[in-house]
Amino acid sequence: MTGAGRCATPLTMADVECPEERLTPELHSKLCKKVAQLTKVIYHLNTRNEDNDAKLQQQQADYEAEIASLLEDSSAKINAAKDESGDQQKKAIIAMEKQVAELEKTYAAEKAKALKELEAYKAKLKVRTPCPPVPHPQRTASLFSPKRAR
């Protein structure tokens, strides 16, 4: 264990629990150096782990901010599309209402014209051929008489 050519000597539990007479200054120096080396490695690993955690948290925050930005942007686009389609629907409704009003005016004018023509035609028929009174009771009685019901 006390070889001068060996840099890193493996330690066993027997070496660690050795009595003080076996703990030479050279062995004590090697143990202190090993402890210092292991302390540096642990410190380096902990620092690297903390750095990675910080990077991971920053990356997560960046992704969440990007997601929020995308959601906000897409929400704005959807609302703009809704507003645009709403405006188009309102314009279409107004155009249809105008068309309905025009059709109602046209219908009322044509109806009035047709009623005038009908009244004129009735008046023309009355002037042309006055109807002689026909005895209706006799005629209907003859139509429904038993002789005819064959």
Image (spheres, grey):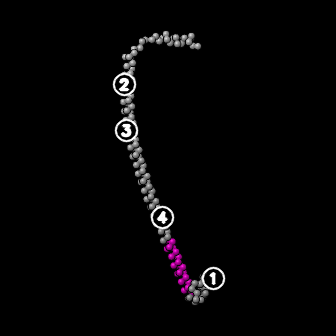
Residue at far bottom of view:
4
Indicate which disc, 3 or 2, sits on the residue closer to the N terminus: 3
**Chief secondary structure of the magenta span?**
helix
Element marked by disc 4: helix
Residue at (52% x, 81% y) in the render: 36
Q: Which residue is mark 1?
A: 14
- Identified by mark 4, the residue type is Gln
Label ID, residue 60 = 4
Taking the spot 57% from the left edge, 84% from the top edge, the residue there is 8
Q: Is residue 112 left or right of residue 14?
A: left
* Distance (Cα) linking label 4 and label 3: 57 Å
Is 37 magenta? The answer is yes
Q: Nearer the viewer, mark 3 or mark 2?
A: 2
Q: Position of residue 33 (x, y in %)?
A: 53, 83
**Helix, strand or loop at mark 2:** helix
Question: Answer yes or no: do the residues labelled 4 and 3 have beta carbons within 8 Å?
Answer: no
- Residue 5's image quarter? bottom right
Q: Is residue 26 magenta?
A: no
Q: Residues within 10 Å of mark 2 (few under 14, many from 20)?
A: few
- Report the amino acid beneath label 2: Lys
Which is closer to the viewer, label 1 or label 4?
Answer: 4
